Image (cartoon, grey):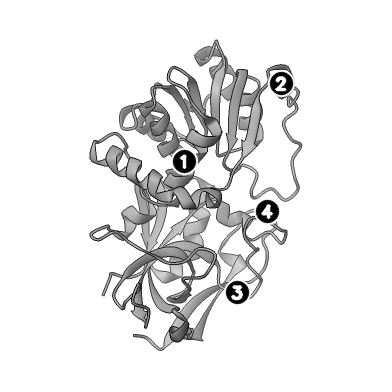
Amino acid sequence: MSEINRQWLLKERPTGMVGPEHFERVDAPLPEPDLAAGQVLVKTLMLGFDPAMRGWLVDEPSYLPPVAVGEPMRASGVGQVVASENPDLPVGTLVQGLLNWQDYSIGDPNGLIPPTPLPEGTPPELALSVFGVTSLTAYFGLLDVGAPQAGDTVLVSGAAGATGSVAAQIARIKGCRVIGIAGGQEKCNWLLEACKLDAAIDYKREDIATRLGELCPDGINVFFDNVGGDTLEAAIGHMADFGRIALCGGISVYNDETPRPGPNNLMYLVSRRIRMQGFIVLDYMDRAQEAIDDLTAWVLNGEIAWREDIQEGFDNIPATLQRLFDGRNVGKQLLKLAEPG
């Protein structure tokens, strides 16, 4: 085990687009867990990247405290326990949880998001992609907040991403007509061919509002939104009476230097009796096994397709986050640091 803990610290809070220049690479001593209290030392093997990480850099109250300037950047990840006196997390155990951009982290079983052992035989990339928090987000956001019924028309933005693609396919599994919005013909083709959606809109070359008018003459019953901004406004304009909007994220506005005006058609929520609700997956973690059981069955039955975009190398960590906002990632964005020991 190395005596040096490589870290990427938040150097300054970004204004506008986040980039590698906002982080600083340093070498630090190994962290020292309180082994007697059940804490463990975890070696990072693989990191996950999600658009929500951009929000963690904003200095304002949220569902998680903002990352402080001078602290290691926070991220989901899979690691291996390398020091432990905890019988539930012995040395060698592969765990997933909230890690950091560093080689070694302290895993605290009593923390906000404690390290959880991976089911035996689960590769790290699967634990972070189709069985990871993005899929749990899709599951609970669609089924609990969106509440689709068989025969509904369901629209998903960011539909080729890790969360959106699973939400769209769950809607299809539940008997809905599903339309996905994505950027580029290749992503749209994947939605149609691999994910078996009914239609796909390429926002890079098609006008979303026009296409929604053509594809949804009777309106949209459920909209699962990962994008916000103009996409949200277009969808509100085509919602059916008593439609439901599940607000998962807003990747189109995360890097805005100044807040843009909100949707100018919110009164449709009144006249059409539309319910629009935001949600955070942390509120559903006590039901995580319910989602994992269903996702496992669907994956084994070939009902869900997924993709992983795996980068490599510690020095590439900040640039890998930026891939999300450049639209270069294909599926769940991951970065591999090491193999299990």
Residue 186 in the image: above or below residue 283: above
Callout 4 touching callout 3 (CB < 8 Å): no
Callout 1 touching callout 4 (CB < 8 Å): no
| Earlier residue among tags 4 and 3 | 4
Q: Residues within 10 Å of mark 4 (few under 14, many from 20)?
A: few
- Can you identify the residue that label 2 sits on? 268
Dot 2: element: helix
Between residue 115 and residue 10, name the one nearer to us. 115
Q: Mark 3 or 1, which is nearer the eye?
A: 1
Dot 4: element: loop
Q: Mark 4 or 2, which is nearer the eye?
A: 2
Tell me the kind of residue under disc 1: Ala
- In the rendered image, which quarter contains the C terminus? bottom left
| Earlier residue among tags 3 and 1 | 3
Q: Return the x and y of residue 273 as percentages of the image width and height.
A: 68, 20
| Earlier residue among tags 2 and 1 | 1
For the residues labelled 1 and 4, the Cα–Cα distance comes to 27 Å
Between residue 319 and residue 232, name the one nearer to us. 232
For the residues labelled 4 and 2, the Cα–Cα distance comes to 31 Å
Q: For residue 16, which numbered disc appears in the image?
A: 4
Residue 90 in the image: above or below residue 4: above
Q: Mark 4 or 3, which is nearer the eye?
A: 3
- Can you identify the residue that label 1 sits on? 138
Q: Is residue 103 left or right of residue 274?
A: left
Residue 265 in the image: above or below residue 115: above
Tell me the kind of residue under disc 2: Tyr
Q: Return the x and y of residue 56 as percentages of the image width and height.
A: 62, 59
Residue occupying the point 34% across, 40% down:
294
Q: For residue 71, which numbered disc appears in the image?
A: 3
